Image (cartoon, rainbow, N blue to C red):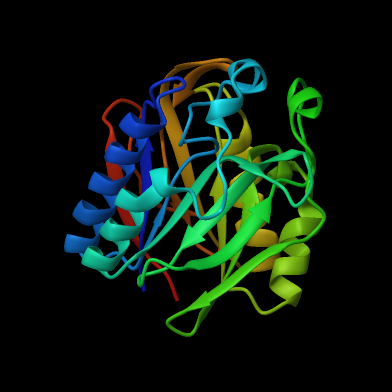
Amino acid sequence: MIIAATQFAPVAGDIDANVRTIAGLVRAAGAEGARVVVFAELCLTGYEPSLIRDTPGLVLTEDDPRLAPVREACRAAGAAAVVNGPVRTGGTGVGITTLVIGPDGSLLARYDKRNLYGVEAEVFEPGAVDGRFTLGGVRFATATCYDNRFPELAARAAADGCAVYLASSVLSADNDSFDEVYPARARDFGLYVVLGNVLGPNEDGVGGGRAGAWGPDGERIADAGDAAPGFVLAEVG
């Protein structure tokens, strides 16, 4: 199976603009054979926790009509999109939520970030359930940025029969995750690890790109570089 790891600079607070970019990347990656397209943490709004806290209209629902272009792109491309944004929980709270939109446009899975970092804990509710979905006979796990600092998530994924671990993150160029965290999760648990990251300024700093993938031996198998928006393809399985 071919997976696309993406990177772009989200427009802070502009869901419509970011959805257009995401839909375009899904279509382009699907045209090159990708069955799954992975995006960064809070790609739908930009990584802007304070702005999200102060702007209720930036909170989405699982079936939010603003995501219609992504659903249409998934159907057109025959690919699943792993997108992340602020999404209403079952109560009154908001999660940092991964929505996996399937090749038919339906919701395959939802995952709420379990381990919140810094200001996130003042804005969002942590999740309590691991993210899983199966596509084309391949079982996937989802995790979000700071989650990846906790090896037990990857351990549970491997024990649960997952072959691919999808990491939606916001990392600056000097973050040690590129060299210390993602290769270790791959190597220690025999997983393919696929990273979606950001470019451009955000509330945490400046996105460093380098979206891509590591093989089960911990070696890099795909790297999108640190400058250009777009995607890189990785074959897994």
Residue found at x 74% / y 42%: 149
For residue 235, what is the image quadrant? bottom left
The single residue placed furthest to the bottom in the displayed view is: 137
Residue found at x 22% / y 55%: 27
Q: Answer yes or no: is residue 218 visible.
A: no
Counting labels gives 0
Q: Please state the horizontal and vertical placement of residue 134, each as a whole percent of the image.
A: 54, 77
Q: Please state the horizontal and vertical placement of residue 135, each as a whole percent of the image.
A: 46, 77
Front residue of 4 and 53 = 53
Q: Please state the horizontal and vertical placement of residue 8, each as a whole percent of the image.
A: 35, 32
Q: Is residue 7 above or below residue 62?
A: above
Front residue of 147 and 106 = 106
Q: As drawn, is 180 to the left or to the right of 12?
A: right
Q: As drawn, is 162 to the left or to the right of 129?
A: left
Quadrant showing the N terminus: bottom left
Front residue of 235 and 146 = 146
Residue found at x 38% / y 22%: 11
Q: As drawn, is 197 to the left or to the right of 155?
A: left
For residue 17, what is the image quadrant? top left
Q: Is residue 33 above or below residue 42?
A: below
Q: As drawn, is 94 to the left or to the right of 193?
A: right
Q: Answer yes or no: is residue 69 visible.
A: yes
For residue 178, what is the image quadrant? top right
Quadrant showing the C terminus: bottom left
